[in-house]
Amino acid sequence: MSTRSGARSRARARTRLEPKARIGVAGRLSIGLSVGLSVGLVGSLGGCLSAKAKGSSKANYELRQEREALLERVTELEAQVAELGVKLEAAAGSENARGLSADALAALPAVASVELVSTSGFRRDGTLAVLVKVSDGRLRAVPATGSLRVDLLRDTGTDLERVAGRSLSAQQVRDAYRSGLAGVAYEVRFPADELIGLEQLVVVASFDDALTGASFEASDVFRRRSASASASNAGVAPKKERPATSPDSKPHTSPEPTLGGSGENG
């Protein structure tokens, strides 16, 4: 009797304990599942953020590329407008131009801008080579017929002081024509003895078109390489350096043809 009673008591005790045990296992499984889901969600969120950052970087790059393309297009359109204005003025004042058809007049290249070529600068022999490019409305080099003047200015701190200059007639401009790897330009060369003690110069080039009467001007800053830089780069020709504020600052080199006396001091 006592034995059967004890067995029933133990059976009831096991029955009461089994639900608690089952609940404990289920709870641990639930906690584990929750932790796993949390880790998974964090990982997914991190992946989403990383993908979003990459997408944003790509979008910024594409916007920068689009901006550069638009700026280039604006430059081209401005040059075309300048060329059209020159053509209209020439057509209004020239009997020969009036005889041209509208199609021929539109196709006729005209000087729309001038610029200083990036390969301009001080040379190893101490001279200064100034290369002037003359372009039409499509920013392509065109033959120039007219007079060219190049002035060298020194910044005194309060003003720009002229230290040297060259004036080229229409025939001298034709003789100053140069072509090479850097393209087509007109060269004006300044001798070394006019540049003694000058480490930085503002160069201004002015061109007067004899065909249309239009005038154009371009300017830039030229710096002489330091002696230490020349010593550490022996055998390398001095190069022109743009001002520090220029976004496309880079070293330049160029061939060194001589002008052959095609300029007059002035």
Image (cartoon, rainbow, N blue to C red):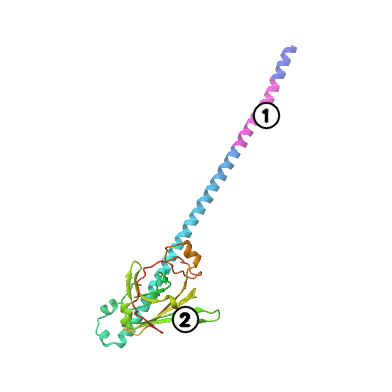
Residue 30: x %, y % from top left: 61, 36
The residues bearing labels 1 and 2 have C-alpha atoms spaced at a distance of: 102 Å
Element on which disc 2 rests: strand
Residue wearing tag 2: 163
Residue 223: x %, y % from top left: 48, 71
- Chain part drawn in magenta: 11-32
Q: Is residue 28 magenta?
A: yes
- Quadrant showing the C terminus: bottom left
Amino acid type for the residue under numbered disc 1: Lys
Most foreground residue, 187 or 260: 260
> Which residue does the image show at 47% across and 82% down from the upper left?
162
Residue wearing tag 1: 20
Residue 7: assigned label = none
Residue 154: x %, y % from top left: 50, 78
Amino acid type for the residue under numbered disc 2: Val
- Quadrant showing the N terminus: top right
> Which residue does the image show at 44% across and 60% down from the upper left?
62
Q: Say few, some or many: other residues with alpha carbon within 10 Å of mark 2 (under 14 / 14 to 19 / 20 or more).
A: few
